[in-house]
Image (cartoon, rainbow, N blue to C red):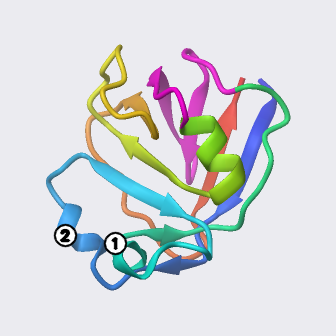
Amino acid sequence: MSVIYKNTIKNIGAEVSAFEGEEMFILFGDNAPDTLKDFCYTIDIEPVSESIEVGNTLVIDGNEYEITALGNVAEKNLVSLGHVTIVFDGATEASLPGSIYVKGSSVPKLNIGSEILIRK
């Protein structure tokens, strides 16, 4: 499997715990709006080497999650803004345009330095 996207959590917003129990988390680059940045995990803006597709694998600190759906602007927002919502409900149709849906039992604990990969 080849890595098509790689990033690392570099900051944790003061209010990310507000989404506990929601089966999701939000990533955003340094340019997050003031109204959102406290709810986001901050990452650098990084390119993808190939298009992200359903069936790819999201890897967080070595834990693997199959990508089941992609919102129509999820990849564009990720590479231009560092912004995407990762939803852990295994949906096969994207209800939010800026989200990546994965199959997973629960949202992993993210820390500064947590590694996020997408593999093909």
Quarter of the N terminus within the rendering = top right
Pick whichever of labels 2 and 1 is earlier in the sequence: 2
Q: Decide if residue 109 is on the left or right side of residue 106.
A: right
The residue nearer to you, when weighing 99 against 63, is 99
> Residue 77: where, in percent of width, then height?
60, 47
The residue nearer to you, when weighing 59 against 23, is 23
Instruction: Give the residue drawn at x 60%, y 74%.
Output: 31
The residues colored magenta run 52-73
Q: Amino acid at mark 2?
A: Ala
Q: Amino acid at mark 1?
A: Phe
Mark number displayed over residue 39: 1
> Residue 55: where, in percent of width, then height?
56, 15
Instruction: Give the residue drawn at x 78%, y 35%.
Output: 4
Secondary element at tag 1: loop
Mark number displayed over residue 18: 2
Query: Which image quadrant for residue 38?
Result: bottom left
Residue 59 against residue 109 in the figure, above or below = above
Instruction: Give the residue drawn at x 47%, y 75%.
Output: 33
The reply to whether the magenta stretch includes residue 107 is no
Quarter of the C terminus within the rendering = top right
Instruction: Give the residue drawn at x 34%, y 72%.
Output: 39
Q: Decide if residue 117 is on the left or right side of residue 26.
A: right
Residue 59 against residue 46 in the figure, above or below = above
Label 2 CA crowd tier, 10 Å (few <14, some 14–19, many 20+): few
The reply to whether the magenta stretch includes residue 54 is yes
